Amino acid sequence: MTIEIPSIEELRSAPIAILGGGAVGKTCGADCALAGQEVRICDLDPFYETSLGTVERTGITIQAKAPGTQSKYGFERFGNARYALVTNSVAEAVRGAKLVIVGVPSIAHEAFFKELIPHLEDGQIIHIIPDNYGSLRLRKMMREAGSTADVIIGGWSSAPYGTRVDTEGGIANAHVSLVYRAITLRGSALPTRDTAAFVESSKALGCFDAITQGDGAVAGDTVLDIGFSNVNPVIHVPGTLLGVSTMENFGTVLGKNLHEYSIYSHSFCPSISEVQYQFYNEEIALAEAIGVGIQPFDRDVFFQRTSVLGQEYMGAGCNVPFEEQWEVGFATGPFSIKNRYVTEDVPVGCHVYHELGVKFGVPTPIIDAMIVLGGVMNHANYFETGMTLADLGIAHLNREQLLAYLHDGSYVEE
């Protein structure tokens, strides 16, 4: 089947559905609304009331987390945004929408996909932000549900910005704060033959304007490439686990406010950078063994405080040396070992790498060590509970079958 893609102007004037009422969903939706687009936002029960219950009344205000927050090229957009529809019904949100953004953690993918699949319409383009293997899961669930909807499905290596929902007394208020805006992101569709149209359609999303007007989106060669190019596991996991003593002593022994802690300012150091770099090398070995791409990073970019994340929002050459005392200017956290930097990035990112390593004969000792340490610290066995290749529908595929599926959609049933 071939989807006829409307022009960017047509896509931009059509309704956009946002699935997810967390930081990414709210910010992407508000950013699109401020760009003049009709936005419908949805969260599922029982989370709807706490995430979106008052949003129809208040809207969402995008503000800067730190003074001067903008993109490298000066793009900025702040203000109060109003959504055209706030709902707990996926069917209502996606009806007639041309572009659908799924902006939830991977743990919520299954629940949203289950609601989305019966209401998919031919010609829709699904953007999973970040992908975190969501494209593979959605295609698998569509096969299992017998869905024949002619849609484009793809994902991105990261979100278009670092963003946080502001809270007071543990209650989310009507503000989201931007830490940075990306000037480039890596994306791909499943199958890859849809990638050109998928990446092009990002130009119709207001939340990608800083990227479109920056260095532009980059096409990965497969959605596995996008999984390997997600910088969260390689940055977050070693930084959090190996810097845990600083985090847990920050408000006690060190006498500081715990909620001013940042892994970038207070955890990252040359020794942790070496672990992150070797972690990345294991990812490279996996990508080469399978025959897919991965976002390239020079060794030097790991050995500075913004690590590889700096290239997303400041481009190549971004460098904050460890010799400099550098306060980020905002608290990135994490503030607990039970943060998603461990509870998502270990059982999803790290465990999928582990399973791919076992399947394709690639040793992953650094990644495996992170799974062990994260599990010990959180009293969990992430080897048993982590995301599996079977969850993605690819456990039984050999290398040739996997590549055929990724590139042209030819799927061999088990």
Image: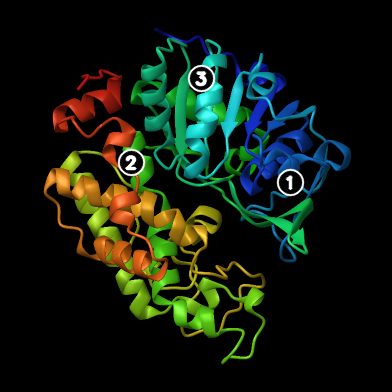
Residue appearing at x 36%, y 25% in the figure: 140
**Most foreground residue, 193 or 162:** 162
Q: Amino acid at mark 2?
A: Asp
Give the mark nearest the N terminus, 1 or 2.
Answer: 1
Q: Is residue 339 above or below residue 287?
A: below
Mark 3 lies on residue: 117
Mark 1 lies on residue: 50
Q: Is residue 384 above or below residue 414?
A: below
Q: How is the image coloured?
A: rainbow
Residue appearing at x 50%, y 82% in the figure: 246
Mark 2 lies on residue: 225
Give the mark nearest the N terminus, 1 or 3.
Answer: 1
Q: Quadrant of the C terminus?
A: top left
Dot 1, crowdedness within 10 Å: few (<14), some or many (≥20)?
some
Name the side, left or right, on which 211 lies relative to 145.
Answer: right
Q: Amino acid at mark 3?
A: Ile
Residue appearing at x 50%, y 57% in the figure: 340
* Mark 2 in CB contact with mark 3 (< 8 angstroms): no
Dot 2, crowdedness within 10 Å: few (<14), some or many (≥20)?
many
Q: Is residue 120 visible?
A: no
Q: Is residue 220 visible?
A: yes
